[in-house]
Image (cartoon, rainbow, N blue to C red):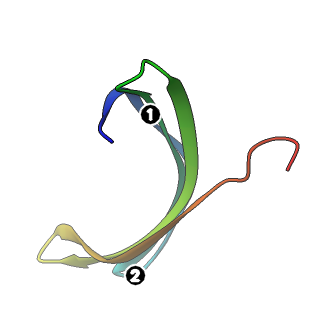
Amino acid sequence: ESSTALMHSLAPVGIAIRGETAVVHYYSSVSAEDSDGKRETTTTRCTDTLTREGGAWRYLGWFCFEEPSEGN
């Protein structure tokens, strides 16, 4: 089943930088419509870890998980 993304938004929660390492926490929300016209919004909470090399930030890793919907 395919879907079409209608909107994607990122909302920062916090950024911690120590030396050449940064940890970033944020929410990612995607609203999509499937082939039947049903719309759904999924929100995930993400944490990224980055390191600075030669003045540029590079990803070391990231982890995201879906936030439980209200009432669950």
Q: Residue at x 41, y 22 (%)?
A: 36
Residue 3 location (% of width, % of height): 33, 34
In the rendering, which numbered label is found on residue 19? 2
Asked if 2 appears above or below 16 in the picture, the reply is above
Q: Residue at x 58, y 44 (%)?
A: 43
Pick the front one: 18 or 69: 69
Name the residue tied to disc 1.
Answer: 9
Residue situated in front as seen by the camera: 29 or 5: 5
Q: Nearer the viewer, residue 14 or 41?
A: 41
Q: Residues within 10 Å of mark 2 (few under 14, many from 20)?
A: few
Rendering coords of residue 47 (x, y %): 51, 67
Q: Is residue 31 left or right of residue 67?
A: left
Q: Residue at x 54, y 30 (%)?
A: 40
Q: Is residue 64 visible?
A: yes
Name the mark on residue 54.
none
- Above or below 64: residue 50: below
Q: Quadrant of residue 41?
A: top right
Kindly identify the residue that appears in the image at 85 percent across and 50 percent down: 72
* Kind of element beneath mark 2: loop
Q: Is 54 displayed left or right of 23 in the figure?
A: left
